[in-house]
Image (cartoon, rainbow, N blue to C red):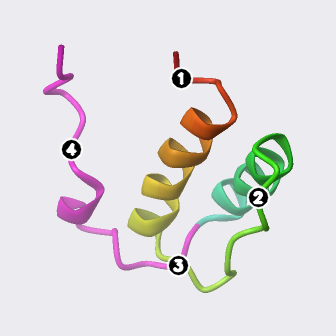
Amino acid sequence: MADNTRKDPKDWVSGDDPMTGAQESYLKTLAEQAHESPPEPELTKAEASELIDKMRQKAGLDE
């Protein structure tokens, strides 16, 4: 079932801002767990959020 309380990252007001330090750190950890390359440091908040979701699935954290 879809969670309607979550806004699509593309619709965020601050989605075009640079990703936060917390997002960058979490993505590096997820990249290691998913055996992927670390993300580009120039990601936006929205791009980082979407990548976090994908990496969580790949790392087996979203079942």
> In front: 49, or 14?
49
Specify the principal SS of the magenta part: loop
The residue singled out by tag 3 in the image is: 18
36 horizontally vs 61: left or right: right
- Front of the two marks 3 and 1: 1
Q: Amino acid at mark 1?
A: Asp
Badge 4 or badge 1: first in the primary sequence: 4
Q: Amino acid at mark 3?
A: Pro
The residue singled out by tag 1 in the image is: 62
- Counting from the top left corner in percent of width and height, residue 14 is at 33, 69
Badge 1 or badge 2: first in the primary sequence: 2
Query: Distance from label 3 to label 2 (Cα)?
Result: 21 Å
> In front: 1, or 15?
1
- Counting from the top left corner in percent of width and height, residue 27 is at 70, 55
- Front of the two marks 3 and 2: 2
Crowd band around label 4 with a 10 angstrom C-alpha radius: few (<14), some (14–19), many (20+): few
For the point 39% across and 64% down, which residue is it? 46
Up-down relation of residue 29 to residue 62 (above or below): below
Residue 36 is marked as 2
Dots 4, 2 in contact, CB < 8 A: no
Instruction: Give the magenta part as a residue range.
Output: 1-19
Dots 4, 1 in contact, CB < 8 A: no
- Assess whether residue 9 is covered by the magenta stretch: yes
The residue singled out by tag 4 in the image is: 7
- Assess whether residue 61 is covered by the magenta stretch: no
> In front: 62, or 9?
62
Badge 3 or badge 1: first in the primary sequence: 3
Q: Residue furthest bottom?
A: 42
For the point 52% across and 15% down, which residue is it? 63
Q: Amino acid at mark 2?
A: Glu
Crowd band around label 1 with a 10 angstrom C-alpha radius: few (<14), some (14–19), many (20+): few
For the point 69% across and 71% down, which residue is it? 39
